[in-house]
């Protein structure tokens, strides 16, 4: 885990991630919360860091549910109590990162290929909160996240799903995600493949429809579109502030606590 007390100075991007994570934890992880979902991505280590700063007494009776291998390690390394969504199907609050968030708090998630479990924990949470740096804050999905919508698919069906995405659903550049340091495709924690499917602006303006169309394809396990799920999104800015977008349409910019 990253140490806020380290002598190593954080880059501006890392500082903005920490601002977003710290503010979200301060606002949403309260003493009465005993089950907390921990998401995935580069902003999440700061979420765990801030939770640890709440103290041993605050955390001793809490259980933390991970969305994947990364968050599981963060929980264990921090000395927090590890749980599983099978044991705790109702979660007080889940805090997770995002690859992009639009003005209505719809999110693209799955750049790290964890979006199936991320969605399970988001749906299980009474409150689902997104944290990110300012680069992920968009008017429309697909503005800054170029790879497209991540789609987890069972291996036996990927060729057919890929063809349908290209020829029917309007994503001609959909591709099977390939591993960077080994031959072959990326394999998820669930043993599946991931397809990245970019769509044009017009289609992404109705992301719920895109989600439904993809989800109905046989062989698709989960789609990295999180529509109408987040209660709020926190974006760390370069000037030391945090922009907050809420599901009720309100927006706020606050000076973050370091």
Image: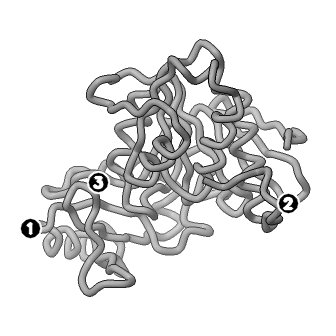
- Residue 238 bears which disc, if any? 2
Residue where numbered disc 1 is placed:
156
Left or right relative to 161: residue 166:
right
Q: Nearer the viewer, residue 122 or 203?
A: 122
Give the camera-side residue of 132 and 60. Answer: 60
> Looking at the picture, how far across and down is residue 208, in whole percent?
42, 47
Q: Residue furthest bottom?
A: 183
Decide: marks 3, 2 in contact (CB < 8 A)? no
Marks 1 and 2: CB-CB under 8 Å?
no
- Mark with earlier residue (3, 1): 1
The mark found on residue 213 in the picture is: 3
- Distance from label 3 to label 1 (Cα)? 20 Å
Q: Residues within 10 Å of mark 3 (few under 14, many from 20)?
A: few
Asked if disc 3 and disc 1 are in contact, CB closer than 8 Å, the reply is: no
- Distance between the alpha carbons at the discs numbered 1 and 2: 45 Å
Residue 210 in view in this figure: no
The answer to whether residue 235 is above or below residue 187 is above
Q: Residues within 10 Å of mark 1 (few under 14, many from 20)?
A: few
Label 1 or label 2, whichever comes before in sequence order: 1
Gap between marks 3 and 2 measured at Cα:
37 Å
Q: Secondary structure at mark 3?
A: helix
- Kindly indicate the quadrant of the structure image that contains residue 195: bottom left
Q: Position of residue 26 (x, y in %)?
A: 73, 30
Q: In the picture, residue 57 is in which quadrant? A: top right
């Amino acid at each position: 885990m990253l140490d806020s007390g380290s002598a190593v100075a954080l880059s501006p991007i890392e500082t903005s991630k920490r601002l977003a994570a710290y503010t979200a934890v301060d606002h949403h992880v309260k003493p009465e919360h005993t089950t907390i979902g921990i998401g995935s991505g580069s902003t999440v280590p700061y979420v765990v860091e801030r939770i640890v700063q709440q103290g041993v007494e605050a955390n001793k009776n809490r259980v933390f549910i991970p969305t994947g291998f990364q968050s599981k390690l963060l929980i264990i390394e921090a000395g927090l109590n590890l749980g599983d969504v099978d044991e705790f199907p109702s979660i007080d609050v889940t805090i997770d990162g995002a690859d992009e968030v639009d003005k209505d708090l719809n999110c693209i998630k799955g750049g790290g290929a964890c979006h199936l479990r991320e969605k399970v924990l988001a749906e299980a949470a009474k409150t689902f909160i997104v944290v990110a740096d300012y680069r992920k804050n968009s008017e429309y999905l697909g503005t800054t996240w170029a790879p497209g919508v991540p789609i987890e698919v069972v291996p036996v069906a990927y060729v057919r799903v890929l063809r349908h995405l290209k020829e029917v659903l309007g994503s001609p550049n959909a591709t099977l995600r390939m591993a960077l340091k080994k031959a072959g495709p990326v394999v998820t924690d669930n043993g599946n493949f991931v397809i990245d499917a970019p769509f044009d602006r017009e289609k992404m303006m109705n992301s719920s429809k895109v989600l439904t169309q993809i989800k109905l394809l046989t062989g698709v396990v989960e789609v990295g579109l999180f529509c109408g799920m987040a209660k709020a999104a926190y974006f760390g800015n370069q000037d030391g502030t945090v922009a907050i977008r809420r599901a009720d349409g309100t927006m706020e910019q606050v000076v973050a606590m370091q």
